[in-house]
Amino acid sequence: MEQKLVDKIKMINEEQLKMTKKQSRIIEVAIEEFAQNGFASTSTSQIATKAGVAEGTIFKHYKNKKNLLLSIVTPTMTKLVAPFVMNGFDIVFDQEYNSFGDFLRDILKNRFEFMKDNLSILKIFMQEISFHPELQESYKEYIAQPLFKRLEDTITHFQEKGEIKELPVPTVIRFTASTIMGLLFSRHIVSTDASWDENSEIEMTVNLIVNGLSPGS
């Protein structure tokens, strides 16, 4: 459990909602349970028992389980995850690269570290985004749209250098992003117990994307 992240989430909620100690404990336990068991499989009674509060206390403060989920993810998305995601990407985007492969390599290393540090809240978000329009809107506004613009500029730059074939930019972004996310998802969600050579996996993924998008392919 990324305790620093949990503490930051609690701090955000405390600032916005002036949380009591009981509410703070409810948030902490809910993050743990939602990340480990999923939103649908976690009951408010489980959270209440582990948090050491009456189940009615949860309903008093959050009305229902979905509001509890949104109280965790939405403030975290807008104040912590989105800025951190974009700031992390800015470190990569603000550099100059000799090749598209070098850019991809840094993106992958950057995202591996980000997922290691923020896995619990990201697991909740990835598990639930398909089921909650509010989370989808937060993702689009605070992450997808700003990130797409930065990627669009980078892809166009390497197309002009002749390193990427003349495909529509959104197509290149979808192919690149889905390949990267597939690797990250496999490593941190699906195959957590498997033996991994991270550097080797990154290199193979970079080569797959570069070769697939090469003008000569």
Image (cartoon, rainbow, N blue to C red):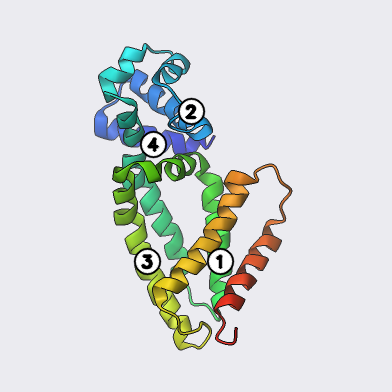
Looking at the rendered image, the disc whose residue lies closer to the viewer, 2 or 1, is 2
Quadrant including the N terminus: top right
Q: Which residue is mark 3?
A: 148
Near mark 4 (Cα within 10 A), the count class, few <14, some 14-19 or many ≥20, is many
Depth order, front residue of 14/148: 148
Q: Which residue is mark 2?
A: 33
Q: Is residue 210 above or below residue 113?
A: below
Task: State the residue at coordinates (43%, 72%).
Answer: 171
Depth order, front residue of 26/193: 193
Near mark 1 (Cα within 10 A), the count class, few <14, some 14-19 or many ≥20, is some
Q: Secondary structure at mark 3?
A: helix
Near mark 3 (Cα within 10 A), the count class, few <14, some 14-19 or many ≥20, is some
Using the numbered discs, state the Cα–Cα distance from disc 2 to disc 3 in whole angstroms: 32 Å
Quadrant including the C terminus: bottom right
Depth order, front residue of 58/80: 58
Using the numbered discs, state the Cα–Cα distance from disc 3 to disc 1 in whole angstroms: 17 Å
Using the numbered discs, state the Cα–Cα distance from disc 3 to disc 4 in whole angstroms: 26 Å
Image coordinates for residue 206, horizontal then vertical, percent:
61, 69
Q: Which residue is mark 4?
A: 9
Task: State the residue at coordinates (48%, 33%).
Answer: 38
Q: Which mark is residue 106?
A: 1
Image coordinates for residue 197, horizontal then vertical, percent:
72, 56
Residue type at mark 2 is Glu
Residue type at mark 3 is Phe
| Marks 2 and 3 close (CB-CB < 8 Å) | no
Using the numbered discs, state the Cα–Cα distance from disc 2 to disc 1 in whole angstroms: 33 Å
| Marks 2 and 4 close (CB-CB < 8 Å) | no
Q: Earlier in the sequence, mark 3 or mark 1?
A: 1
